[in-house]
Image (cartoon, grey):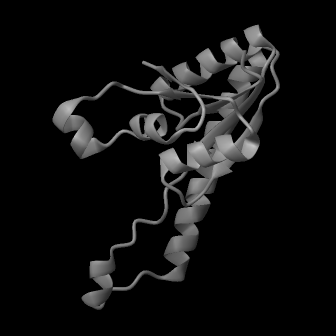
Amino acid sequence: MYAHILAATDGSDLASRGVTHAVRLAKALGARLTLVTVTEPFPFLAAGTEAGWGVAAEDIARFRQVNKQAAEQVLTEARRLAAEADLEAGIVHVADAEPASGIVDTARREGCDLIVVASNGRRGLQRLILGSAASEVLVTSPVPVLVIR
């Protein structure tokens, strides 16, 4: 049915439930598993440069280093969940990207045929204000998406 599953995680408890589900599914199907986490770009405010404020290169470098360390921790924990089920998992950190595009691009690049994401199911104004990476993955993915709630 599915030969290569991509599970997205941000390290949250909700995302861990999604990873756990993906691990179980991959194990049951004998599928490969790839774990991905995406860290967003530096929140550069263009208006600040017009006011004479600048962002130092060191600030951006430090931001990226902190994101890299956080991603390593997230992926280590996700890989541990896979290892508990005697399943090897590949890991991917996509830096400086929007979550949904990072997830979908990784699925394409890795040749995944299913994406597993978690969602808290926000609706209406909350979804509009807070956004939903899971919703964007659903509408942009070229492969099936399994949403865990």
Q: 134 or 93, which lies in front?
A: 134
Task: Please indicate, yes or no, whether residue 38 appears anywhere in the rendered image.
Answer: no
Task: Please indicate, yes or no, whether residue 5 appears anywhere in the rendered image.
Answer: yes
Instruction: Give the side of residue 47 with respect to residue 2, left or right.
Output: left
Q: Quadrant of residue 37?
A: top right
**Count of numbered badges drawn on the protein:** 0
Q: Is residue 130 above or below residue 112?
A: below
Q: At x 32% / y 43%, what residue is drawn?
A: 131
Q: At x 52% / y 64%, what residue is drawn?
A: 63
Give the image location of residue 142, x and y in percent.
Answer: 58, 38
Please identify the quadrant where the N terminus is shown. Answer: top right
Instruction: Give the side of residue 96 with respect to residue 89, left or right.
Output: left
Residue that sits furthest to the left in the current view = 125
Residue that sits furthest to the top in the current view = 28
Q: Quadrant of residue 64?
A: bottom right
Instruction: Give the side of residue 128 with respect to residue 43, left or right.
Output: left
Q: At x 49% / y 42%, what residue is drawn?
A: 140
Q: Is residue 99 above or below residue 31?
A: below
Q: Is residue 112 above or below residue 108?
A: above
Please identify the quadrant where the C terminus is shown. Answer: top left
Give the image location of residue 148, x and y in percent.
Answer: 48, 19
Give the image location of residue 4, x and y in percent.
Answer: 75, 27
